[in-house]
Amino acid sequence: MALRDVLLDELRDMYSAENQLVKALPKLAKGAQSPKLKQLFTGHLQETKGQVERLKKVFAELGEKPTGQHCNGMEGVIEEGKDALEKDEESASFDSGLIGAALRTEHYEIAGYEVCISMATTLAMPNVAKLLSSNLKEELAAAAKITTAGIPLMKQSAQEPDEQKKPKTGKEKYSAKKSREDEAKAAPDLNTSTV
Ligand SMILES: [Fe+2]
């Protein structure tokens, strides 16, 4: 069954994504300045460990091994989180950047679990769909908690003075150059002219 193979690839991607998050979440928790945000990331780390275990059960159910595919998408999203951790901003402004990074990881996972559940349901695998739905439920709850925690932090950040602009790092310069390249590559396909 071709769809079973596609599902296995997706599941291995999720397994890699969750394992990558087990390594990344303590760094976000350590970096967060607000105790509330620290606590959220630490709490979600425990949930994430449980999600890895649930995914192992999914693979046991399917009689397959969980490894075999590295999730490049999550690697990229975590890389953006590292950028957020390197920002010079202070207190609530710094944390506001972390909120963006953390929400990206959650929504990436939400998309992954949603498609896996659709496939498992199509393949009449209720046990697999049920285990994956438990993970999805936790991701949705985590995203909602992060969004809610962000509201007071962003209000506070809006009151904080601008940081003095520091010279761009090599990494930032490279990123700016790539963004101009992105724009230039898209330009022929866009009807709008850049000002
Ligand atoms: Fe997760």
Image (tube, grey):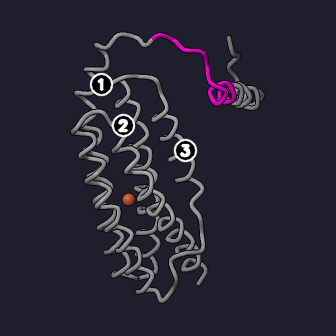
Question: SS at mark 1?
Answer: helix
Quadrant placement of the C terminus: top right
Q: Which residue does the numbered mark 3 point to in the structure image?
A: 79
* Camera-nearest residue between 91 and 47: 91
Tag 2 residue: 99
Q: Which residues are magenta?
A: 164-176
Q: Are marks 2 and 1 in contact (CB under 8 Å)?
A: yes
Residue 25: % across, % down: 39, 51
Assess disc 1: are there few (<14), some (14-19) or many (≥20) residues with their C-alpha within 10 Å of its C-alpha: some
Which type of secondary structure does the marked residue at label 2 adopt?
Answer: helix
Which residue is outermost to the bottom? 63
Label 2 to label 3: alpha-carbon separation: 14 Å
Q: Report, in whole angstroms, how far the alpha carbon at label 2 lies from the one at label 1.
A: 10 Å
How far from the left and from the top, in percent, is residue 167? 60, 15
In the image, what residue occupies the spot 51% across and 12% down?
Answer: 165
SS class of the residue under badge 3? helix
Rendered location of residue 133, percent (x, y): 32, 68
Q: Nearer the viewer, mark 3 or mark 1?
A: 3
Apparent side of residue 40 relative to residue 9 in the rendered image (left or right): left
Pointer 2 or 1: first along the chain:
2
Residue 157 in the image, given as x and y percentages of width and height: 31, 20
Disc 3 versus disc 1: distance between alpha carbons?
Answer: 23 Å
* Mark 1, residue position: 154
Amino acid found under the numbered disc labelled 3: Glu
